[in-house]
């Protein structure tokens, strides 16, 4: 249990093991994964030829992929996913109301029965539980009887901002074409994963924990990759990871993981497994396609096996519609938020067309998972304007003018040029 809880440190070791073929496989045939890599490269090449399209076909007579309503003023549907419109945060408080919280589904939201649902821990990392034979189970009521904790945490999809690789930089951007709305902060309440692991008989020599979702298997490129799952080092699992059964003071909604989801503060969204059921606890390193094939940086400047996405980079968004209309000649209070996976936001600057100037930070947010800010602006005359915001976090990480491209189009951190019209 000497592993560092930072994802980059964990991955450096796991990458070596994976590439050396020394570690246990990830449940998927390696040749199949190699073929998948080729297929994904083809998708990337095809995407370079055209604008990303949102597929919206839903088979008739089948539950829609997302259970909650998707009012167009709050959410934009992207196939099985939905992104929040930043204009829907104007006038809101610190957290994102559940009705507009983004949804990222690899397949569809499963409708699970809380009466029969069980959290099921298994693996050689538990005392007296040989792999897959004697799981240690918890019902929802049993979890609710354990000491509860609350955490205000940010969940962001690693592909958030992806569409700007294409629209601002003219680069290939395969995958869900998120604008900046694949992010949200909520108040999560539940039980610490660490407390549950200890009750289940965690061994001192356990190294990895892998929660799996009960949504349908993820099939891509004709290959069944099994349940959505992603390993965590035990050190992170014992640190601040929550098994959440409430979101913003209400039972977790179907789309966000009902009855129970994992919340991994500071790590990319895919770590926060929804609809968790099985949890493998292992004394040997665990792998899944979600840390070997996806959520890695591939392309020029990256090693053959790619580089894991560690924390999310710095981003900033205006709480304004894209192409918003604002009154010319009147003073406006521009509002927005900035966030970073590597540390709290220290400074935000805004450019309305005549150079960068400091924005005012909302004092109450200092040190939290995201930072609200405001800036006054009087559009001098009617016409088109471009608004820009950029932030710097406590580590000094900021936002460049251009994001570094990578094959799967993750980590978009560049300043976004937000068009508005004064009239
Ligand atoms: N079981 C399961 N868990 C999952 C996913 C999924 O498709 N299935 N998507 C992941 C991804 S990629 C993200 S970004 C977050 C999104 O959480 P949300 O839908 O509650 O916003 O859930 C993660 N957990
Ligand atoms: Mo994601």
Image (spheres, rainbow, N blue to C red):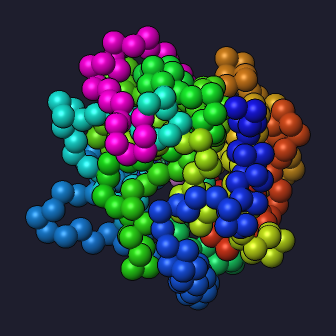
Q: Position of residue 275 (x, y in %)?
A: 35, 42
Quadrant in which residue 299 is drawn: bottom right
Horizontal and vertical percent position of residue 41: 60, 82
User: Foreground: 167 or 142?
Assistant: 142
Q: Per the image, is 133 magenta?
A: yes
- Between 94 and 330, the one lying in front of the other is 94
Which quarter of the image is occupied by the N terminus? top right
* Residue at the (53%, 27%) spot, across then down: 202
Image quadrant where residue 277 sits: top left
Q: In the image, is residue 220 above or below residue 247?
A: below
Residue drawn at x 35%, y 36% as measured from the top left: 135
Residue 402 among magenta residues: no
Q: Is residue 23 left or right of residue 122?
A: right
Nearest the viewer among 27 and 150 is 27
At 78% from the left and 45% from the top, the residue drawn is 9
Looking at the image, which is closer to me, 298 or 248?
298
| Residue occupying the far left of the picture | 61
Residue at image location 27% in from the left, 72% down from the top: 57
Q: Is residue 194 above or below residue 121?
A: above
On screen, residue 224 versus residue 337, left or right, reads left
In this rendering, does residue 341 appear at all? yes
User: Do we see residue 99 in this rendering?
Assistant: no
Image quadrant in which the C terminus is located: bottom right
168 is higher (above) or lower (below) than 5: below
As drawn, is 82 to the left or to the right of 302?
A: left
Give the percent coordinates (x, y) of residue 222: 39, 79
The part of the chain drawn in magenta is 129-157
Quadrant of the rendered image containing residue 375: top right
């Amino acid at each position: 249990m000497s592993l560092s809880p930072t994802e980059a440190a964990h991955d450096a070791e796991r990458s070596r093991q994976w590439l050396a073929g020394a570690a246990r496989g990830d449940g998927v045939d390696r040749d199949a994964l190699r073929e998948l890599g080729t297929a994904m490269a083809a998708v990337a090449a095809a995407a370079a030829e055209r604008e990303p399209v949102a597929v919206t076909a839903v088979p008739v007579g089948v539950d829609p992929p997302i259970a909650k309503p998707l009012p167009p003023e709050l959410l934009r549907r992207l196939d099985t996913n939905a992104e929040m419109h930043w204009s829907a945060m104007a006038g809101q408080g610190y957290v994102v109301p559940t009705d507009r919280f983004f949804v990222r589904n690899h397949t569809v939201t499963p409708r699970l029965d809380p009466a029969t649902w069980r959290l099921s821990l298994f693996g050689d990392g538990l005392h007296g539980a040989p792999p897959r034979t004697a799981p240690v189970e918890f019902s929802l009521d049993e979890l609710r009887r354990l000491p509860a904790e609350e955490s205000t945490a940010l969940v962001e999809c690693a592909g958030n901002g992806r569409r700007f690789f294409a629209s601002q930089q003219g680069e290939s951007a395969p995958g869900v074409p998120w604008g900046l709305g694949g992010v949200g902060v909520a108040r999560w309440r539940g039980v610490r994963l660490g407390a549950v692991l200890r009750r289940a008989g965690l061994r001192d020599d356990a190294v990895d924990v892998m929660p799996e979702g009960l949504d349908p298997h993820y099939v891509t490129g004709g290959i069944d990759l099994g349940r959505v799952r992603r390993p965590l080092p035990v050190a992170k699992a014992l640190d601040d990871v929550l098994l959440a059964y409430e979101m913003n003071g209400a039972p977790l909604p179907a789309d966000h993981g009902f009855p129970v989801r994992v919340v991994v503060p500071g790590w990319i969204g895919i770590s926060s497994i929804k609809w968790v059921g099985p949890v493998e606890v292992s004394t040997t390193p665990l792998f899944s396609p979600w840390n070997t094939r996806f959520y890695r940086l591939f392309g020029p400047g990256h090693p053959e096996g790619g580089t894991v996405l560690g924390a999310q980079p710095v981003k900033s968004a205006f709480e304004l519609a894209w192409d918003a209309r604002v009154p010319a000649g009147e003073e406006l209070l521009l509002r927005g938020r900035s966030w970073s996976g590597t540390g709290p936001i220290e400074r935000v600057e805004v450019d309305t067309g005549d150079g960068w100037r400091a924005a005012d930070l909302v004092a109450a947010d200092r040190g939290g998972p995201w930072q609200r800010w405001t800036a006054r602006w009087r559009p001098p005359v009617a016409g088109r304007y471009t608004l820009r915001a950029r932030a710097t976090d406590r580590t000094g990480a900021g936002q460049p003018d251009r994001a570094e491209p990578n094959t799967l189009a993750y980590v978009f951190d560049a300043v976004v040029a937000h068009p508005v019209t004064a009239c």
